[in-house]
Image (cartoon, helix red, strand yellow):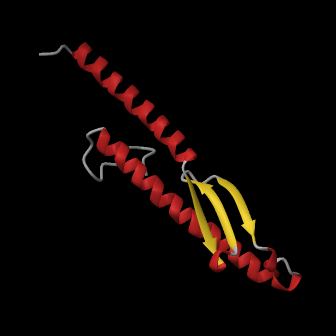
Amino acid sequence: MKSMEEMIQAAQKAAETIQQQMGDAQAKLDAIEVEGTSGGGLVKIRCTAKGRIMGVSIDDSLMKPEEKGMLEDLVTAAFNDARGKADRVANEEMQKIQSGMGLPPGFNLPGMG
């Protein structure tokens, strides 16, 4: 039987391992890119799975003062599309990490969703 000190050391080591894996997962999420689109591809927004915006592309045909309101709506829709894709990818990656830790499905660790 392990002593209390050995159990505490094992728990600390497990916590450090989980913390390292979480840091690695966050870095991985920031490296995965997704693209949201709207207007049949006239507006595109690239972002990381962590939600950081990488770029916006707007087709020249939308660059008219009278189309300003529609353009704003398309940018909003493209952002929401990108954000939804980023969230799905992030959730999939975090589930992979969680299952790799041997945690049961649905177990919620702080920072994992």
The location of residue 89, given as percent across then percent down, is 46, 56
Residue at image location 37% in from the left, 43% down from the top = 97
The reply, left or right, for residue 86 in relation to residue 94 is right
Residue at image location 27% in from the left, 43% down from the top = 103
The reply, left or right, for residue 39 in relation to residue 72 is left
Q: Residue furthest left?
A: 1
**Picture mark count:** 0
The location of residue 96, given as percent across then percent down, is 35, 47
The reply, left or right, for residue 19 in relation to residue 76 is left
- The foreground one among 88 and 2 is 88
18 in relation to 81, above or below: above
The location of residue 43, given as percent across then percent down, is 69, 72
Q: Residue furthest bottom?
A: 66
- The foreground one among 111 and 37 is 37
The reply, left or right, for residue 72 in relation to residue 24 is right
Q: Residue furthest right?
A: 65
From the image, which quarter does the N terminus lie in? top left
The location of residue 28, given as percent across then percent down, is 51, 42
Residue at image location 57% in from the left, 46% down from the top = 30
Residue at image location 30% in from the left, 38% down from the top = 101
Quarter of the rendering containing residue 91: bottom left
Quarter of the rendering containing residue 21: top left
31 in relation to 6, above or below: below
